[in-house]
Image: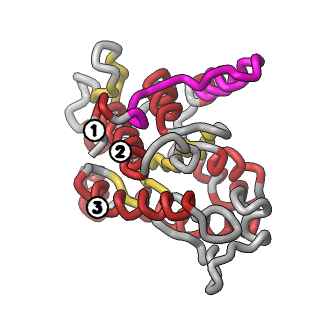
Amino acid sequence: MSQGDSNPAAIPHAAEDIQGDDRWMSQHNRFVLDCKDKEPDVLFVGDFMVQLMQQYEIWRELFSPLHALNFGIGGDTTRHVLWRLKNGELENIKPKGHEFDPWSGNWIPHATTKTWLSQINKKVIVVWVGTNNHENTAEEVAGGIEAIVQLINTRQPQAKIIVLGLLPRGEKPNPLRQKNAKVNQLLKVSLPKLANVQLLDTDGGFVHSDGAISCHDMFDFLHLTGGGYAKICKPLHELIMQLLEETPEEKQTTIA
């Protein structure tokens, strides 16, 4: 459970400008503008794991053709992502046949569109965040991720959501690695209770039989190399393509 206001990881909060250059807010504002005139089929949102993905060829190979937008910011926690999504980063992702209702904060079908269901443009939103929640317990982190899913379901009810499981970290076994594994176990139980969401929990074989992680997968035992991203992105791409494809029932509705 997200635990609402009692869970500090589920309370939206803008990142503090500790360094004094306001880069975090500048990135957020750019994201809001980036999607204003675009209709992305896929949106990635999260922390450095998302942000750095676009620096590698795997992004250009698999996700650029899908009109994907990357809304990742290094250092973000679940609280920061919640704040960003509540403050504009979802508002301009317009489903076809819908208009934005400023009173509810949601996209609603055009009143004059009788067959609006056949006009919805499928969207996939990928969420990857939580490993930076150092001040929170595994239960709180899982609750923060659940709160993000619930917010997306409210603001973008037509979207399919993929939550990427947290990766192991550190060269050798350590408490943070254990905590991330516990978050994933909690999400396996809680996310199936929510609508329009799937958990993709793939560790990519990063942990070897001796419990160590190779620098060839994570160059500093946290940030992924190009090869490390490939292990995650290939199964992720397959799932995204499945979600973007029309079912026979949807195809029939479109034809009708």
Dot 3 surroundings within 10 Å: few (below 14), some, or many (20 or more)?
few
- Disc 2 marks a residue whose amino acid type is Gly
Q: Which mark is residue 189?
A: 3
Please give the residue where the numbered disc 1 appears in the rendered image. 3
Note whether 171 is above or below 179 in the view shown. below
Point out the stretch of residues depicted in magenta. 8-31
Note whether 152 is above or below 89 in the view shown. below
Give residue 231's position: percent from left, percent from top.
64, 71
Q: Is residue 18 magenta?
A: yes
Q: CA distance from mark 3 to mark 1?
A: 15 Å
Q: Is residue 107 magenta?
A: no
Write the residue at 71% across / 18% down: 22
> Contact (CB < 8 A) between labels 1 and 2?
yes
Write the residue at 67% across / 40% down: 74
Give residue 173's position: percent from left, percent from top.
61, 70
Please give the residue where the numbered disc 2 appears in the rendered image. 143
